[in-house]
Amino acid sequence: MRPGWVALSLLIAVPACSPVRKYQEAAQSLRFTLDRVEPDLELAFPLDRSRITFNVTIGVENPSSVSFHLRGFEGAFRLEMDGELQPLGQVKLLRALDLPAGGKEQLAVALSFAYKDLAQAWPALQAALGGERPGVWALEGNLSGDVHGFPVQVPIRTRRSFGAEP
């Protein structure tokens, strides 16, 4: 066998046997829940000075035997009501969280938006805040972290219903 082919086959085989694959599989086993979404409306006049803050708690469960150091999250926060998806805003968290093997932790964050940022979604938000119709809060994006110095990216897609089941 030529030396070039030996080197190529070694380069292909090494990542499959390395701990990186184990860490990636462990990262894929992480489970996420949207444990709490508590909106707080601060009305002001004129209306464009109003703000809404969402106190959001994300649950993270690690069923694997690998510990993670989570560095941050980037994604989108949305409201689904009457079959329509209303984007509320982009979320970027740079808060670290150490997640032990077999452990469970919560990441709490306050997301604050101005009326002008949510003008299109305002009617749906008013209905959600008033409890007039059922709906779903949705959070999706990517969580970044480290496992023993190796970087990992984990997709998050989680939802929380409110009101009667939609």
Image (tube, rainbow, N blue to C red):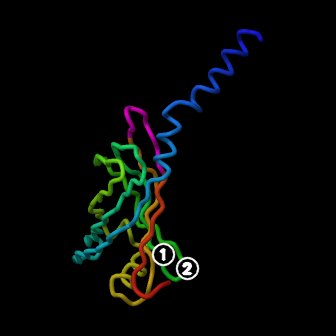
Q: Residue furthest bottom?
A: 132
Left/right placement of residue 6 relative to residue 135 reads right
Q: State the mark number for residue 152.
A: none
Query: Against 114, is 41 above or below?
Result: below
Viewer-closest of 93 and 99: 99
Q: Which residues are magenta?
A: 146-154
> Residue 44: image x %, image y %?
22, 76
Q: CA distance from mark 2 to mark 1?
A: 6 Å
Secondary structure category for the residue under label 2:
loop
Query: Against 61, is 82 above or below?
Result: below
Residue at the spot 47% in from the left edge and 71% down from the top edge: 86
Magenta run includes residue 153: yes
Magenta run includes residue 115: no
Say which quarter of the image contains residue 113: bottom left
Which amino acid type is shown beneath numbered disc 2?
Gly
Residue at the spot 30% in from the left edge and 69% down from the top edge: 54
Secondary structure category for the residue under label 1:
strand
Viewer-closest of 65 and 36: 65
The residue at which mark 2 appears reads as 83
Q: State the mark number for residue 80.
A: 1
Left/right placement of residue 42 relative to residue 21 reads left
**Tag 2–tag 1 contact (CB < 8 Å):** yes
Residue at the spot 45% in from the left edge and 76% down from the top edge: 136
> Residue 25: image x %, image y %?
51, 45
